[in-house]
Image (cartoon, rainbow, N blue to C red):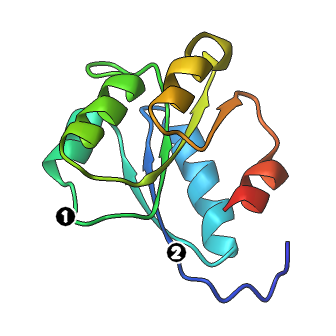
Amino acid sequence: MNDTLNYQGQIHIVDDDRVVCHSLTRILNKHGYHVKVFSSAEQYLAMLEEGFDGYLLLDYKMSGMSGLELQHTLLEKNVNPIVIFITAMGEQIEQRALQNGALRVFDKPFDLNELIKIL
């Protein structure tokens, strides 16, 4: 990836693992992205930005609403971020996530360089 990246894209992360959120935020900030972190799907929905069409990095298994349930709810609300799942349950949810419009499903642990290439 080019270190002179000027793109100031918006990325929302919904994951209840603080370590994952912190690591992703640091790396993505270094690549010029503006990151907002949400610890649950419910928190994300409560603070949902109308018209948000940036990237949504989404875990599947969280307390409360799952990532797939959040993805479905966003579709119902006609909110269309570019969804990328980052989860330890990748094989189990990949088909449903992709059918619902996810761009990619990464299985934890994953290659950060692959994520950056997609973004």
Q: Quadrant of the N terminus?
A: bottom right
Q: Is residue 12 left or right of residue 115?
A: left
Instruction: Please name the residue shown 59% across and 19% down the image.
Output: 95
Q: Nearer the viewer, residue 103 or 25?
A: 103
* Residue 48: percent from left, percent from top: 21, 55
| Mark 1: secondary structure | loop
Residue 90, by quadrant, is top right
The answer to whether residue 69 is above or below residue 77 is: above
Mark found first going from the N terminus, 2 or 1: 2
Q: Amino acid at mark 1?
A: Glu
Q: Nearer the viewer, residue 67 or 19?
A: 67
Instruction: Tell which residue pokes out farthest to the front in this image.
Output: 99
Q: Nearer the viewer, residue 99 or 41?
A: 99
Q: Is residue 33 left or right of residue 109?
A: left
Instruction: Tell which residue pokes out farthest to the top in this image.
Output: 92
The answer to whether residue 114 is above or below residue 42 is: below
Residue 107, by quadrant, is top right
Q: Quadrant of the C terminus?
A: bottom right
Residue tagged 1: 50
* Residue 115: percent from left, percent from top: 73, 51
Q: Amino acid at mark 2?
A: Gly
Residue tagged 2: 9
